[in-house]
Image (tube, rainbow, N blue to C red):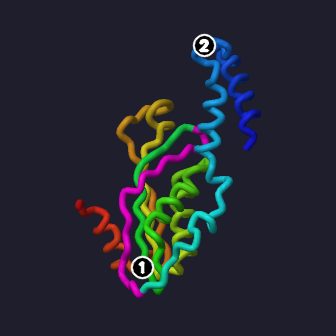
Amino acid sequence: MNVERVAELVRELLAEIGENPDREGLLKTPERVARVVEYLTSGYRMDIKEVVNGAVFEAFANNMIISRDIEVYSLCEHHMLPFFGRCHIGYIARHKVLGLSKLARIVDCYARRLQIQERLTEQIAEEVLAATDAEGVGVVLECRHLCMMMRGVEKQNSIMTTSSVLGSFRSEAATRAEFLNLLSRTV
């Protein structure tokens, strides 16, 4: 990403909306916004193989592994406004488990792109399946969308929930039910 060019565009945007980009409070805003955009879209410049970085370990673990409440922050591709919430990932390993932090890194890799929540959910599930060759994978995202909250219909308490189930999580109702039941429990 060309940070200098994005800063120029932000400066033009400030002038277009009626602001003076040369006033004291806005002097460094174009560069700050360009750096924020660079960070929030860094997923486009990540290689998923490097994200996982070989943190797949041989293990006999034919049970459900769940990581709950992974924070997720992304940008809606329709309005470029943030959406944020929690991601829950579960999988049943065959002979490989993924390093715990790598689940969060996979979430970030796909969330740091212009997204829709439905696609983000599916991308995370597919990557966990590909990385682990799991028997099954389930992903649930619960997010608040600022495009719903601060513009348009202005519904402050709306939460969108999406799920993606692959392998045994899709084909076996009992496996899917166990996953969803475990997500509903508090620690």
* Res 51 quadrant in image: bottom right
| Of marks 2 and 1, the one in the foreground | 2
Say if mark 2 contacts mark 1, CB within 8 Å.
Answer: no
Q: Is residue 75 above or below residue 107?
A: above
Residue 80 placement: quadrant: top right
Up-down relation of residue 96 to residue 115 (above or below): below
- Of helix, strand and loop, which one carries label 2? helix
Identified by mark 2, the residue type is: Glu
User: Relative to 48, is 87 on the left or the right?
Assistant: left
**Does residue 142 show up?**
no
Query: Where's residue 137, x and y in %?
Result: 46, 73
**Tag 2 residue:** 24
Horizontal and vertical percent position of residue 130 = 57, 75
Position above or below: 1 against 179? above
Main secondary-structure element of the magenta-colored stretch = strand
Name the residue located 74 percent from the left edge and 33 percent from the top edge.
4
Residue 94 drawn at (x, y percent): 46, 85
Residue highlighted by disc 1: 92
Give x and y (percent) for residue 42: 63, 49
Dot placed on the residue nearer the N-terminal end, 2 or 1? 2
At horizontal 62% and vertical 32% (from top left) the residue drawn is: 33
Which span is picked out in magenta?
60-80
Q: Does residue 122 show up?
A: yes
Please rate how many residues cluster around mark 1, counting C-alpha atoms within 10 Å: few if below 14, some from 14 to 19, many from 20: many
Membership of 66 in magenta stretch? yes
Q: Nearer the viewer, residue 113 or 35?
A: 35
Quadrant position of the N terminus in the picture? top right
